[in-house]
Image (cartoon, rainbow, N blue to C red):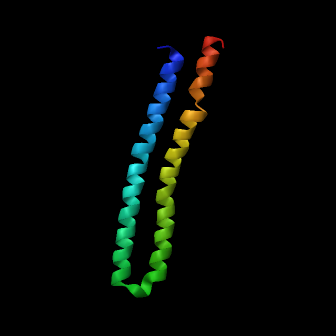
Amino acid sequence: MDSMTIIAVASIVTAGLTLGIGVLGPSLGEGRAVAKALTSLAQQPDSAQAITRTLFVGLAMIESTAIYCFVVAMILIFANPFWNHFLAASGG
């Protein structure tokens, strides 16, 4: 295997692991947040507006972590900085 193939395989595997592991935490966190919000809504229906607003802000913050992982994976696949480094070192 040449160096270009090793970089490609490492990039794809790393992107897959980034998405797999990086989305696992936020998805569990979102599920737990929604479950707690529903419990809170059931116990105090008068506070529904405040609980819902806070829930959506929290979900947006949690989801941003998964989006960052997606962006890192896309950079590794489509705009990998190691490609340019390797090409410059090999003279190509």
Quarter location, residue 51: bottom left
Residue 16 image position (x, y, % from top left): 44, 38
Residue sitting farthest toward the bottom = 46
Residue drawn at (64%, 17%), measured in percent from left and top? 88
Residue drawn at (33%, 83%), measured in percent from left and top? 43
Count of all numbered marks drawn on residues in the image? 0
Residue sitting farthest toward the right = 92
Q: In this image, 76 relative to 13: left or right?
A: right
Query: On screen, 89 above or below 46?
Result: above
Residue 59 image position (x, y, % from top left): 47, 63
Residue 24 image position (x, y, % from top left): 38, 50
Quarter location, residue 89: top right
Q: In this image, 83 relative to 6: left or right?
A: right
**Image quadrant in which the C terminus is located:** top right
Residue drawn at (44%, 40%), measured in percent from left and top? 18
Residue sitting farthest toward the top = 91
Q: Nearer the viewer, residue 2 or 90?
A: 2
Residue drawn at (57%, 25%), measured in percent from left and top? 82
Quarter location, residue 29: bottom left
